[in-house]
Amino acid sequence: MTTLNSELIIDPNIFRQNISYIKKKLNKSSNFMAVIKSDAYGHHLENIVRDIDDLADGYGVVRTDEALKIRKLSDKKILLMQGIYNESDFKLARKNNLDMVVHNIEQFNIAKKFSEYNNLWFKVNTGMNRLGFEIDEFLDIYSRYLQDTKFTLMTHLASSNDKNSISNAKQFSLFEDLKEKLHSKISLSVANTGCIMNYPEKSYDWVRCGIGIYGGYIDDDNLKTAMTLRSPIINIRKILKGESVGYDGRAVAEKDMKIASVYLGYADGLPVTIRDGTKVHINDNEASVFGKVSMDITTIDISDNKDCKVGDWCTFFSSKLPISNIAKSNDLISYFLMTSVKSRVKKIYKNIN
């Protein structure tokens, strides 16, 4: 038995800095919905609600149990972003004043049975081709049931991170053409983080911001990573030119090297696919992965880090080493890394300064 731990340190001060930076890009009339599904992307849902409630106008989640946790902490708007799928959940949502997305006819029929259309968000498909009514299908529902009803019209961009993608212009055009066919009392919502950063003029009435809060957006260095994933060095050894390190002998030394074994592996949430050369920090200096990630250990080339010793921390991402770095260099996405950290990693949620 050992009490030694890898650590995931979460800094809410960075959430607040990121949100403040993002909100400066929005139209003054836009409302800010903090997307905190999946336990706030692994950052601890209840803590983040307490620490950003004064900055958020609402919260977006997928699971009803998460929405109910938020409702105990906040009276702000809460949106079930994929809606509900049975009558009992509809009643539960109504009882707890939850907004609901309606994205198909089955969900609409539940609302229609109760003749309750308030606080509904109707999602239309403009090109993502996952969820959402086809536009003609929605217009039929609108003409029959919604012409005197306040609701929010929403869609989801497929390529918001890529300002050069022609799909964005097509989706905006479809959405805005549809808006012109509806009454003027509806609210509009398109923008996720990528849309806010690349098309702030499309922030409309509500933005739904997730990854930007946590600092996982790739293309803006002003957004800082709120998580620090780190683990101690538990062994240091020298290897000779031609020797290999780790499973399958993937990493072969081209010169004499010094290798640190770090107490973190794929059982802790670090993907087994992490490549040799992936940058980490030890004592604020760069080092790099060398050898295949195993269940409990990752091996690091510290040949150029003369002062490393057993017990020093190796950091895989932090506010100084963006999570987007490890994501981009390994063909991963920040979302995956944030939500993959396992329970045996000690989670430390810092206090607001």
Image (cartoon, rainbow, N blue to C red):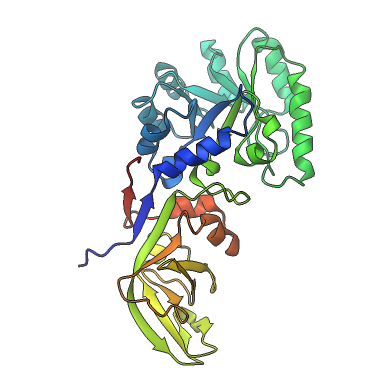
Front-lying residue, 1 or 321: 321
Residue 206 to residue 158: above or below? above
Q: How many marks?
A: 0
Q: Position of residue 89 (x, y in %)?
A: 44, 24
**Quarter of the image with the C terminus in it:** top left
Q: Position of residue 257 (x, y in %)?
A: 46, 86
Front-lying residue, 23 or 143: 23
Front-lying residue, 349 or 293: 349
Front-lying residue, 153 or 104: 153
Give left or right: position of 119 versus 348.
right
**Residue at position x 75%, y 22% in the image:** 178
Q: Position of residue 302 (x, y in %)?
A: 44, 78
**Quarter of the image with the N terminus in it:** bottom left
Q: Position of residue 179 (x, y in %)?
A: 73, 20
Give left or right: position of 167 versus 132.
right
Give left or right: position of 331 versus 88.
right
**Residue at position x 38%, y 48% in the image:** 10
Can residue 34 be seen?
yes
**Residue at position x 48%, y 63% in the image:** 271
